[in-house]
Image (tube, helix red, strand yellow):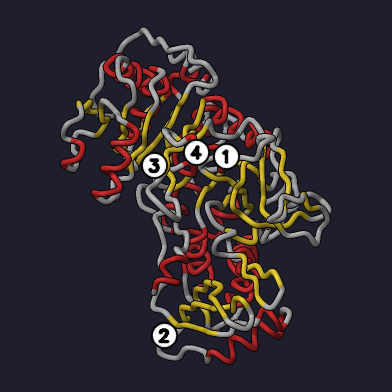
Amino acid sequence: MTLLLPALQSPTGPAASREAVRFGALSLTYGELAAASTALAARIADAGRVAVWATPTAETVIAVVAALRAGVPAVPLNPRTGEAELAHILADSEPTAVLAGPDDALPPALEKLRRATVDARAFERTEDHPAVEADPEAPALIVYTSGTTGPPKGAVLPRRAIAASLDALEDAWGWTGDDVLVHALPLFHVHGLILGVLGPLRRGGALRHLGKFSAEGVARELGSGGTMLFGVPTMYHRLAEVLDAQGGGAERGELAKALAGARLLVSGSAALPVHDHERIAAATGRRVIERYGMTETLMNTGIRADGVPRPGTVGPPLAGVELRLVEEDGTVLEGPEAIGEIQVRGPNLFSGYLNRPDATAAAHTADGWFRTGDVGTVDGDGYVTIVGRKATDLIKSGGYKIGAGEIENVLLGHPGVREAAVTGEADPDLGERVVAWVVAADPDSPPRAEELADHVAGQLAPHKRPRTVHFLDALPRNDLGKIMKRSLHAG
């Protein structure tokens, strides 16, 4: 506890009355959060691991803080996980108890576990707030990744990695106890839980969770004291749509004023299209900054608060993080024209995959670099640009390496395109051909495929021109708003 959340160590001091978290009308001070988590920690101290039914509620915050306080690894569960996947996670992680809210209806797979009910409105109050002094390498969380093949793997995140990433963000963003973070991210993943909950709690600041994302909620919370906004590209796209709306009236004006008044607007979990960057900047005078991380590595890079925002980039490596680009044959690449797999090394890395020494070994080089599977470039100032996933976003066509993200940004700049994704598909002549998947701005009058192909060819090199254009009603996305490109291939 000392390592991760120092603000909860002295809840009877000056910090006790400060707001820690707010979910709708329910607010907990640091003193209340410390008391609730202490009482729960005593109940789970004998558990080897605990599962957390991670709803977007104060109960989830109490549960995770209690597990950290007790020194018990927590396994956040996505409440929308299907039966087969949930069964795999439970069999793999073997929790002995599940922490859930009083009104949560748990699926049958969890019935055999001891249930510890967490109620943010009714908890035992005590003046004694002990916390386990855990080893920095001790597992804090086991977060399951949605792998592209096979069942999800449990990434074991030690306390050391969480502290290192959050402190690197403190350095990059000037994050202090005076900051009030606003977001509506799910709490079963790194973005919403570690950055979005443990981040403000480590700094001694506050979290205001919207429960469900809305432009109205963002405007309300940022306009009444919020200083930082975390979101995924889908959320910022919706904000840009409101800001762009003709005749938006008071809602548009209030949102623009609230965003303009925030200290930091941060997007992550996927690339934010340049078109949305520009729309938000034009309406508010503020730039959204991006950062780059993964479940296994937590945070790798980020635009600094005192740095230069560059739409389409995710900034330089954070403090303590080493980053390099590597060719398929293992050659380390250098120079602004180089494009290769991103590999990272540093105190932010996970301990390994639970019960999977084979996968852990395969994910690392012999000298300890983690193979991210992401492809990118690094400019002369050290700013990283993510081209995409090696498996789905790097297209090899006619001897050229083509990044899908570059083409997607150009397509999104066409007035007839609302959403776009680009993939590569096998081609007997080119090796792979560029394929575009488009959601039209006006479904009743979509642009012609040839028009979109010409639009790309006119702004980029001819070999980046889409050879095929498919029109869809919507792009398939996961809970974090990432486009599931393998579903496009399957479709």
Q: Secondary structure at mark 4?
A: helix
Indicate the amino acid at tag 2: Pro
Residue occupied by mark 3: 188
Residue occupied by mark 4: 358
Using the image, determine if residue 203 lies above or below residue 262. above
- Marks 2, 4: nearer the viewer: 4
Residue occupied by mark 1: 297
Q: For mark 1, does the 10 Å Cα neighbourhood hold few (<14), some (14 to 19), or many (20 or more) residues?
A: many
- Residue ID at (66%, 45%): 343
Indicate the amino acid at tag 3: Phe
Which image quarter is the C terminus in? Answer: bottom left
Q: How far apart are the alpha carbons under marks 2 and 4?
A: 47 Å
Q: For mark 2, does the 10 Å Cα neighbourhood hold few (<14), some (14 to 19), or many (20 or more) residues?
A: some
Q: Which of the labelled discs sits on residue 443, or is there none?
A: 2
Q: How far apart are the alpha carbons under marks 1 and 4?
A: 18 Å
Indicate the amino acid at tag 1: Thr
Q: How far apart are the alpha carbons under marks 2 and 1?
A: 40 Å
Q: How far apart are the alpha carbons under marks 3 and 2?
A: 35 Å
Indicate the amino acid at tag 4: Asp
Q: How far apart are the alpha carbons under marks 1 and 3?
A: 16 Å
- Residue ID at (47%, 66%): 485
